[in-house]
Structure formats: structure tokens, C-alpha cells
Amino acid sequence: MEEIKKEDLENYLNGVYQNIRTAVQSIDELLPKVKDNNLKKELASEQDVYIALQKECEVFSQAEKLEKIKDNNWLEKAKLWSSINLSTMTNKTTRHIAEMMLFGTFMGYITCVKDLYDHKNISKEIDDILSRLKEFERKNLDALMPYLV
């Protein structure tokens, strides 16, 4: 593998991994605040799939002998944590939490679309993980919408 190709591969994989990690971290922060049992089950189920996709990224990284894939940096984690906690400080309603998840899920979906376009012809394996992530996030949008009403 050429060095530039390896760097492109690492950048692509890191982008996908960080997208997934953002979802996992968001759900970690939100789950304890959720009162509605159905939404709690939905988010826990979503988190299981995100974690499985995360593990696929980690296995791919090891198989390709890439540098360790990078989680979101501490500043990104702190921004996410403070955003969620400030937003739910005064409003922990099911509707509000679903709205927050919908915004985050849609942002993740947009990132998938952009990453697939920006990293064409780099890795069919990463494309596959990202395509499944994109499809999963599309389904999550549909699953979360009913909690707005």
C-alpha cells in the first residue's frame, strides 16, 4: 500500500469511526435522562448497532495495520457533553430528547453522504461500512419521528 494511500485510508476510516463514536457518546449521555421506556429501548437498540459498526472499523484498522484509529478529541467530546447536558438541564421531555437525537442523526447521515463522495475509490470495505451506517441512520430518522408527537 502506498504511503499516501495509507494516509487516505486512515483519514477515511477515522472519519467514519468518529461519526459512529459521536452517536455512541450521544446515546450514552442521553439514555439516563430518558423517561419513556419505548424511546429508551429504541436508543439502546440503536447503540448496539453503532457499537457493532465501531468494532468493524477497529477490526478493519487492525487487519490493514493502520495506525490506531482515533476517537473524537477531548474538545469534541466536551462540546458534545456540554451541549447535551445544557440542552436537557431544563427540558428532559421525550419530545426534546427525540428532537436532539434526530438532529444528531441527520447530521451523521449528511456526514455519511459527504464522506462517500469525498473518499471515492479509496476502500470498498470502508465504503461498505459507511453505506450500512448511512442506511441505518436513515432508518433511525424514521424510528425517532413518532416521538415528536
Image (spheres, rainbow, N blue to C red):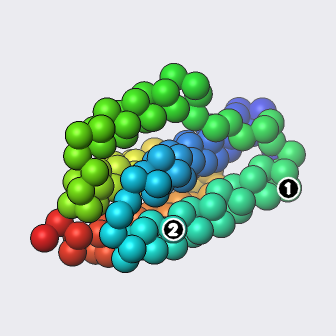
* Residue in the picture at 80% in, 36% down: 67
State how many labels appear.
2
Q: Position of residue 141 (x, y in %)?
A: 30, 67
Discs 2/1, front: 2
Q: Position of residue 43 (x, y in %)?
A: 44, 66
Residue lying at the far left of the rendered structure: 149
Quarter of the N terminus within the rendering: top right
Identity of the amino acid at label 2? Ala
Taking the image as shown, residue 75 lies to the left or right of residue 139, namely right
* Residue in the picture at 33% in, 69% down: 36
Identity of the amino acid at label 1? Ala
Q: Tell me which label, 2 or 1, sits earlier in the chain.
A: 2
Q: Secondary structure at mark 1?
A: helix
Taking the image as shown, residue 139 lies to the left or right of residue 47, namely left
In the picture shown, does residue 71 fall above or below 47? above
Q: Position of residue 89 (x, y in %)?
A: 30, 38
* Residue in the picture at 71% in, 62% down: 56
Q: Where residue 63 is drawn, which disc sits there?
A: 1
Tag 2 residue: 44
User: Which of the 4 image quadrants contains residue 50?
Assistant: bottom right
Q: Secondary structure at mark 2?
A: helix
Taking the image as shown, residue 3 lies to the left or right of residue 18, namely right
- Residue 116 visible? The answer is no
Residue lying at the far top of the rendered structure: 75
User: Which of the 4 image quadrants contains residue 144?
Assistant: bottom left
- Real-space Cα separation, disc 2 to disc 1, in angstroms: 29 Å
Q: Position of residue 93 (x, y in %)?
A: 24, 56
